[in-house]
Amino acid sequence: MQLPLYFFGDTHFKSSQSNQEKAKVKKFSDFLNSITTKTTTGSLFIMGDFFDYYFEYANQQRSEFDEIFSKIAKMKDEGFEIYFIAGNHDYWIGDYFKKYTNKTFLDDTTIAHKNTSIYVTHGDGILSWDTSYRLLKKVLRSNIFITTYSLLPKSIANKIAEKISYERKDSHQIDQNKLSRIHDELEGFAKEKIAKGHNYVIMGHYHHSYHKKLNGGELILLGECNENDYNYAIFDGDKLEIKNF
Ligand SMILES: [Mn+2]
């Protein structure tokens, strides 16, 4: 992957034309511009939950997200590499979206550069109490589900997806006690990855920024990216920094 690497995620773009969505797209565009004015090449790593809901039909020719895609396409044309890891809100990525990326990952992946290894995950399905979610994930991602679902009229398919998307909403308001338990579990997950030789474990999904040094490695949770704040990470080949735009 071409350096520097930029990581961000959880934009939760919706297809609505609300003022909030327009502001979100504007912020996204400003963020991309800020990157391309700093460096002419690099890699953009979208960490998942790029969409609040996305479903792609076979042989799809256009999308309600084309405005967003055109911004990525422009960046790719100008020499940036685009990578995408699917989150729990955008499982049903297909060929139409994939063509905007250099590579799309449906599962966790690792990036190696010289002596540095970065473990990248959206972050869903890690917590020990997420057992039923892990099962749901298998069903939602299965070919049989996707085929059956794609046969439904679009209006009904959208309604079902909205419901699933709503019920899988990542918890935004959680108390300190719950937060500590989540951090304990994610640190345990990261420690295992670090013991296997990874230097950084980076994820989104939890909608808040958190950074912890652990046994010679680091755990990084990236916050949500919305119309007001962009929490992102940049890896220049030597070090990984967390920033806000
Ligand atoms: Mn998520």
Image (spheres, helix red, strand yellow):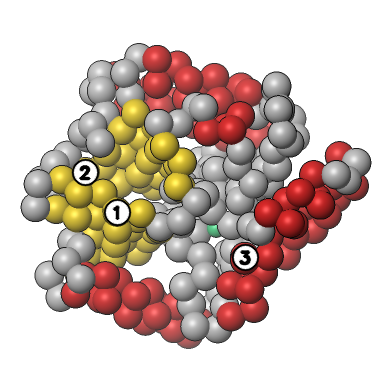
Q: How busy is the neighbourhood of tag 3: few (under 14 within 10 Å), some, or many (20 plus)?
A: some
Q: How many marks?
A: 3
User: Foreground residue, 95 or 136?
Assistant: 95
Q: Seen in the image, is 187 located left or right of residue 199?
A: right
Q: State the SS at label 3.
A: helix
> Which amino acid, by three-letter code, is at mark 2?
Phe
Alpha carbon separation for disc pair 2 and 1: 14 Å
Identify the residue at horizontal 14%, vertical 53% (top origin): 116
> Which amino acid, by three-letter code, is at mark 3?
Lys
Q: Which label was assigned to residue 235?
A: 2
Earlier-in-chain disc, 1 versus 3: 1
- Quadrant in which residue 201 is drawn: bottom left
Say above or below: 156 vs 138.
Answer: above
Residue at the disc numbered 3:
137
Earlier-in-chain disc, 2 versus 3: 3
Is label 2 in contact with label 1 (beta carbons under 8 Å)? no
Establish whether ligand 1 lies closer than 8 Å to the Cβ of label 3.
no
View quadrant of ligand 1:
bottom right
Quadrant of the snapshot with the N terminus: top left
> Which amino acid, by three-letter code, is at mark 1?
Thr
Is label 1 in contact with label 3 (beta carbons under 8 Å)? no
Give the image location of residue 224, x and y in percent. 49, 51
Q: Seen in the image, is 113 located left or right of residue 104?
A: left
Give the image location of residue 120, x and y in percent. 35, 55
Quadrant of the snapshot with the C terminus: top left
Q: State the SS at label 2.
A: strand
Q: Which label was assigned to residue 110?
A: 1
Foreground mark, 2 or 3, reads 3
Q: Which label was assigned to residue 217?
A: none
- Quadrant in which residue 232 is drawn: top left
User: Foreground residue, 120 or 7?
Assistant: 120
